[in-house]
Amino acid sequence: MTQDTATFDPRRISLRPDELDGRVIAVTGPTAGLGRALALECARRGAEVILIGRSVKKLEAVHAEIDALVRHDGRPALPASIAPLDLERGVAGDYDAIATAVEQRWGRLDGLVHNAAILGQPSPIESQDVPTWVKVMHVNVTAPFALTQVLLPALRASPDASVLGVSSSVGRRGRAYWGAYSVSKGALENLLQVLADELGKTTVRVNSLNPGRARTGMRRQAYPAEDIGTLPLPESLMAPFVALLGPQSRGVSGRAFDAQ
């Protein structure tokens, strides 16, 4: 069913236990925080999850968690797959290897979530460390671009594919002292808009989702004096992510959504 893009709100979608049944979904940064919560929730909803991250040990830990899961519909979760990739230091061959593995095993990709990101050093522009700025821009913008590019053939091969970028309020409107992180998230939003426009007549939809405040390591890094225990757990924010990855958002593209 094609949704009206003007009225669709992923926060108001009623999800089925098997909302993602049969879908192959790749998640970057799946070993902690929002990424881990999303990888587990996708598995609970029936998806076969590809875990893309730097630390094989941490990826294996999430893989084991998924192996032990029972889906919301009572069936065992499908085994996850591990795809090691260092977004800071990875070279072209590392990206190509993931694309080749996806195409050989599944022949398609139904979902790609750009969740991995680094904060850098919040400070005034005049004080920004240039090497750190370059690293933040590379991990938060260039790496998602490169991964999307190599996976586009697999996404196009899906009858209903979703590319979803995890955004931020400071990516929607730049804010003082957020420096490279704010600029990188704004650039990610623009990348997704360009991609959505280019893929407008295909079966691939592209959107961004700002999760808002959440109890994550990055939030603690950005606000060390905040009582993080008062913030929502990542697990409580997963419904809009699932809605944008599942069949109920078919036809919705080029939008910027909020999870809270």
Image: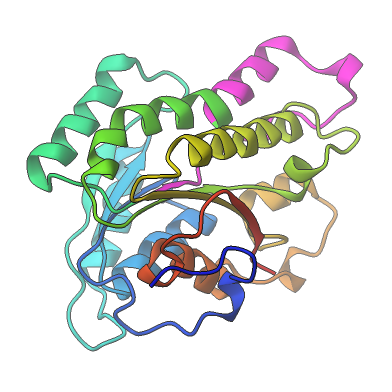
Query: Where is residue 103 shown, x and y percent of the image?
Result: 14, 38
Is 136 magenta? The answer is yes
- Residue drawn at x 86%, y 28% is 123
Give the number of marks.
Answer: 0
Quarter-wise, where is residue 36 in the image? bottom left
Query: Where is residue 51 shown, x and y percent of the image?
Result: 31, 48
Residue 214 sits above or below residue 1 on the image: above
Q: Nearer the viewer, residue 111 or 51?
A: 111
- Residue closest to the far front: 201
Direction from residue 194 to residue 90 in the image, left or right: left
- Residue drawn at x 23%, y 51% is 158
Residue 23 sits above or below residue 72 on the image: above
Where does the C terminus fall, quadrant-wise?
A: bottom right
Direction from residue 221 to residue 188 in the image, left or right: left
Direction from residue 11 to residue 104 in the image, left or right: left
Q: Nearer the viewer, residue 144 or 132?
A: 144
- Residue drawn at x 35%, y 66% is 42
Residue 155 sits above or below residue 15 on the image: above
Direction from residue 128 to residue 15 in the image, left or right: left
- Residue closest to the far top: 130
Q: Nearer the viewer, residue 157 or 27?
A: 157
Is 82 magenta? The answer is no
Query: Where is residue 62 shown, x and y percent of the image?
Result: 32, 57
Where does the N terminus fall, quadrant-wise?
A: bottom left
User: Magenta segment, which residues?
Assistant: 112-139
- Residue drawn at x 46%, y 28% is 145
Query: Where is residue 127 shown, x and y percent of the image?
Result: 87, 17
- Residue closest to the far left: 104
Q: Please name the colour scheme applied to the rendered image.
A: rainbow
